[in-house]
Every structure is written in structure tokens, then in C-alpha cells.
Image (spheres, rainbow, N blue to C red):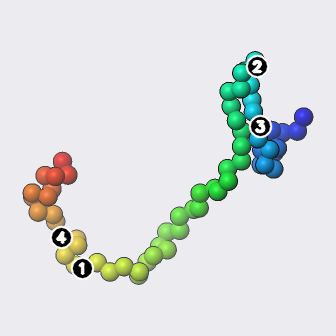
Amino acid sequence: MSNPIERAERGEEIVIARGKTPVVRLVPIQNPPKMRVPGLFKGEFEFPESFFDPLPSDELLGWE
């Protein structure tokens, strides 16, 4: 029997049973997550200088 992971990577659905009861299905991941690229949008957005000002006290209370 070939490696079940390799078989699943080729598209085969592998069902693993405990006794006669199926308990696990091994299938390939269709779309692996893309890696994030640091600095991808650097220079794409502008923030006013006031963006970095401290929040007013009433707004800070809403975050607590």
C-alpha cells in the first residue's frame, strides 16, 4: 500500500476507519493560504498627521 498522504495529494479521498466505523477523511488542501508580503502596500495610503493623535477620553472608555 502506498503512502496515504501521497495518495491524497494526487486527489484520492482516503477514509480511515476505527473497526467498521469511518472516523477520518484525508483529502488534499485545495487552495493553500498565500504568504503575506511585508510592505506590499507601502506608499499606497496616506494618513493625516492627526491620525496619530491620542484618542479623546470618551472614546478610550469605549475600548475598555
Q: In this rendering, which labeled residue sits more in front, label 3 or label 1? A: 3
- Which SS class for mark 4? loop
For marks 3 and 1, give the CA distance: 55 Å
Q: Going by the image, does 17 lie left or right of 33?
A: right
Q: Quadrant of residue 43?
A: bottom left
Q: Residue at x 49, y 69 (%)?
A: 38
Q: Say whether marks 2 and 1 touch (CB < 8 Å).
A: no
Q: Which residue is mark 2?
A: 20
Q: Going by the image, does 16 lie left or right of 39?
A: right
Q: Residue at x 18, y 70 (%)?
A: 53
11 is higher (above) or lower (below) than 17: below
For marks 3 and 4, give the CA distance: 56 Å
Q: Say whether marks 4 and 1 touch (CB < 8 Å).
A: no
Number of marks in the image?
4
Q: Which residue is mark 3?
A: 14
53 or 12: nearer the viewer: 12
Q: In this rendering, which labeled residue sits more in front, label 4 or label 1? A: 1
Say which label, 3 or 1, has the lower sequence index: 3
Return the residue found at the far front: 21
Q: Which residue type does callout 4 highlight?
A: Asp
17 is higher (above) or lower (below) than 61: above
The circle drawn on residue 48 is: 1
Q: Position of residue 59 (x, y in %)?
A: 14, 58
The circle drawn on residue 53 is: 4
